[in-house]
Amino acid sequence: MNAFLYGLGLQWKLDIRSKAMLITCYLLPLIFFAFMGGIFTSINPQSRQTLIQSMSIFGVSMGALVGLPPSLVEIYSSDIKKVYKANGIPLLLGVVIHFISAFIHLFIMCTIIFVVAPITFNATIPANIPVYLVSLVIYIATSLSIGSVFGLVMKNIPKLTMVSQIVFMPSIMLSGIMFSTDMLPQSLEHVGKIFPATWAYRTMTGKEFDLVLYIPMIVVFVITVLISVFAMSKKTNG
């Protein structure tokens, strides 16, 4: 436990100094929030009702799908992996620590949006804050689990970047945070349901807790965790 807490504290310090983590978990999401928040509310004043949810989903997707994976590739596709083995440190510890550290950073970023949006853009606070928080926690965990799979399966940064963007862009465009899914062709609306962001947006903007809407995110989380465990076992034995 002491080793785990030490590793988590060390990773937190490294993240604070990491330009990549700063950019993907804080800078880009908050800049996007600052610019698009003003644009959204000017074009469509009704967007104030869901601005916090939309910007939170964008920020989490950015940090989890684009920010986390390169850090894992750096560990498990380089000599750092050998250092882990040489010192008897379980390889699983690396992905767990990165997961927890990234989770904390993304939650802080969403908290900033939650606090600032009503002040700067007169955004509406979620009608049911407990439901919003539960949805946010589940979405962060699900997104990070997907990012962990990318980081464990991909072996080089260029391919990783391409795969991350292939998932990130449709996830944002088809989820309903940019514009209503009613404006999409029916085929694309169905495609959008593949991505957890779509379900996160529905749950975050809901007034009541509906377990059925959480099932797709939970299923994705379980599947990606199993894939991560399998990928990690191959790296451990490799």
Image: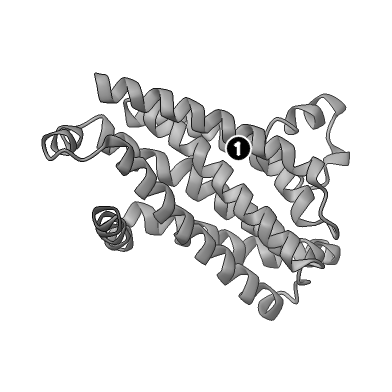
200 with respect to 79 (left or right): right
Give the quadrant of the C terminus.
top left
Q: Which amino acid does label 1 sit on?
A: Met
Residue 172 shown left or right of residue 49 in the figure: left
Specify how the rendered protein is coloured.
one colour
Say which residue appears at 23% left-offset and 54% top-offset. Answer: 3
In the figure, is residue 118 to the left or right of 128?
left
Residue at 18% over, 38% down: 84
Check the image and name the residue furthest to the bottom: 119
Q: Is residue 111 above or below residue 90?
A: below
Q: Where is residue 231 in the image (x, y as percent from the top left)?
A: 39, 24
Measuring 32% from the left and 63% from the top, which residue is drawn there? Answer: 16
Q: Where is residue 81 in the image (x, y as percent from the top left)?
A: 20, 34
Q: Is residue 178 above or below residue 216?
A: below
Q: Nearer the viewer, residue 215 or 159?
A: 215
**Local secondary structure at mark 1:** helix
x, y percentage for residue 169?
A: 60, 37
Q: Mark 1 points at which residue?
A: 169
